[in-house]
Amino acid sequence: MAKEPKIYKGLDGVVVDETSISKVMPETNSLTYRGYAVQGLCEHCCFEEVAYLLWHGQLPTRTQLRAFKKDERSRRKISRDHLGVIQKFPKRAHPMDTIRTSVSYLGTTEIAWGGEPVEADMERSMNLLAKIPTMIATDYRLRKGKRRIAPRTDLSFSENFLNMCFGEVPPKQVVKAFDISLILYAEHSFNASTFATRVVTSTMSDVYSAVTAGIGALKGPLHGGANEAVMNMLLEIGSADKAEAWLRDAVANKRVVMGFGHRVYKWGDSRVPTMRGCLEDLARWKNDRKWIEIEDVLEDIMVKEKKIHPNLDYPAGPAYYMMGFDIDMYTPIFVMSRITGWTAHYMEQNAANRLIRPLSAYTGVKQRRVKPIAKR
């Protein structure tokens, strides 16, 4: 008899390829980008430096960073035709659907295939990095019935996006918290959206198709959409004095408590303390600790009784809420950060490509004969 194959649901524990881009170091439980712990990157670097690191393997020198910023800023504008596409999006459409379509449209403006020189991949990656914030902010303003705000070249990556959304650059602590969130969300090895990106890349398709696939995967609430779900959960709870009763009812009725657990981390998400610090800064700025107080109650019970720790989405959700973003904007913000990781993996996959084509265990009926319709 044939040996039954072992099934690894969700590819749990399966190592499918090599990568030099990121890793959670087991000895420190720290997520690292190209060997640097994200905590250190958040403390000493801006998002543009981290984008450079993910693509080039090393942190930039002062001269390299200056050139990188100048190049990114020069590409921020989108065409009039592209603006016309965004203007036609239904106002009720989820921003993840509009950014997915907007990236796909960008791919129609040129003929691109996989396996091209890495310089071409880098060029398109920079275009995506620079233009995605403009696409998201433009759609954000138009959906709210407001005049779009064009990108500026005198502002940093984070300052420019915040200005395009809100019409002004907020205080430094807000910009810093936002920039740190982008660093923390930039890359995370073979997560669902990155693996989807690499699968499409392996077919020798183009970077726009690969990124569009990544956006589709990121939309799901078990992946990128979790930060939206966290904030909706906090709003449903309403206040700290209701948090414990809400949680115990949710557990009793087998509801998923959003923002907890992670398949990779054994002792808690290493990104959480850094983002929690940003959340504390924002609470002081707003003079409002309501969401922190609710989260403290939930976290205390989940860690003590369930041994389940919060993940990055847990502090990020209320942080974006205090910045003033609508909840359905949280995952598109994730996109404008993770585009760095996706494109780094796109280039890495192309450098040593093999078509990703796993097997499956068939559980259907055995082979049978087709009978003429008159005999059925």
Image (cartoon, rainbow, N blue to C red):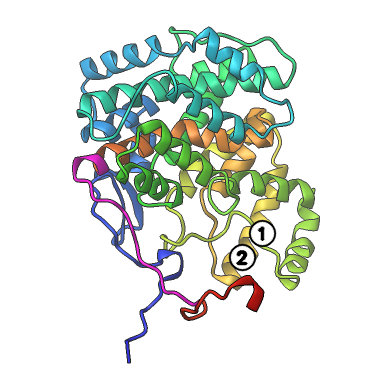
Is 235 drawn above or below residue 181 in the view shown? below
Identify the residue at image location x=45%, y=55%. Answer: 269
Tell me, for residue 298, which label it has, or none. 1
Task: Read off the residue under disc 2.
Answer: 302
Left or right: 357 with respect to 135? left
Say whether residue 170 is visible: no
Identify the residue at image location x=48%, y=24%. Answer: 132
User: Which of 11/137 is in front?
Assistant: 11
Specify few, some or many for label 1: CA neighbours under 10 Å numbering under 14, 14-19, or 20 or more: many
Q: Are marks 1 and 2 in contact (CB under 8 Å)?
A: yes
- In the rendered image, residue 368, in percent from the top left (x then y), is placed at 49, 79
SS majority, magenta: loop
CA distance separating discs 1 and 2: 6 Å
For the record, the magenta segment spans 349-363
User: Which of 35/103 is in front?
Assistant: 103
Is 290 drawn above or below residue 282 in the view shown? below
